[in-house]
Image (tube, rainbow, N blue to C red):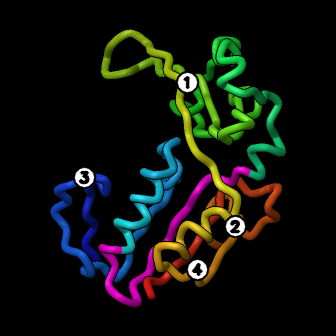
Amino acid sequence: MCEFICADILDDHLPLKNNSFDTILCLYDVVGTYTDNTKNLRILKQIFELLKNGGLVVISVMNLRVTEKKAKNVFVLKKSSSKLLELKASNTMEVSGNIFDPDYYLIDTDTKIVYRKEQFSSYKGSFPIELIVRDKRYYMNEIIEMCENIGLKVIEKKFVKAGWDCDFEEEEAKEILLLCKKI
């Protein structure tokens, strides 16, 4: 039997017991949602605490290498923040989810933070809105090191576009998928 629990892993009063999960899925780039890597590391630490010894976690993160390879727009936010105003807006999140379209993102070469300008036409029945969305993407060695530093052993690693069976070269894959074990 499988029980799914939906909760905010960063909640200080998380209603879950440590060492109580056999398996945790952390997919669709939860790690990387925050540009402050302290919060992303906190997510991984919480996962570690929730897993039983020998428990498994599947983690996906966005691949920074392919993001950089495709990039048409780079800048340094501290030196040229006005570049954000020039960034073309898209309805990518609402329509396709293809957040790797190089016409619609900027990479800050100092921080490696990726910026997108997203339009949402049907936001809770109100007028359309436009938001600047930021995310953190990773190199394979970077996310492996983060996992290993908190005690997760990486059992398998792959560059993927969608799903575990798809194995791609680093410069082609949109995501990195890890299978880790609590040791």
Q: Amino acid at mark 3?
A: Asp
Task: Return the residue at label 3.
Answer: 11
Q: Amino acid at mark 4?
A: Val
At a point 27% along the width and 81% down the height, the residue shown is: 19
Q: State the SS at label 2.
A: helix
Task: Return the residue at label 2.
Answer: 141
Indicate which label's residue lies in the foreground, 3 or 1. 3
Q: Camera-side residue: 79 or 43?
A: 79
Question: Is residue 60 toward the left or the right of residue 140 in the image?
Answer: left
The answer for how far apart the CA atoms under marks 2 and 1 are is: 30 Å
At a point 38% along the width and 78% down the height, the residue shown is: 23
Task: Return the residue at label 1.
Answer: 118
| Residue positioned most to the front | 78
Q: How would you rate the neighbour count of disc 1 (Cα within 10 Å): few for under 14, some for 14-19, many for 20 or more?
A: many
Task: Return the residue at label 4.
Answer: 154
Secondary structure mostly seen in magenta is strand
Q: Does the segment drawn in magenta span residue 153?
A: no
Indicate which label's residue lies in the foreground, 4 or 1. 4
Tell me which numbered mark, 2 or 1, is placed earlier along the sequence: 1
Where's residue 88, x and y in %?
68, 17
Tell me which numbered mark, 4 or 1, is placed earlier along the sequence: 1
Q: Camera-side residue: 127 or 110?
A: 110
Q: State the SS at label 1.
A: strand
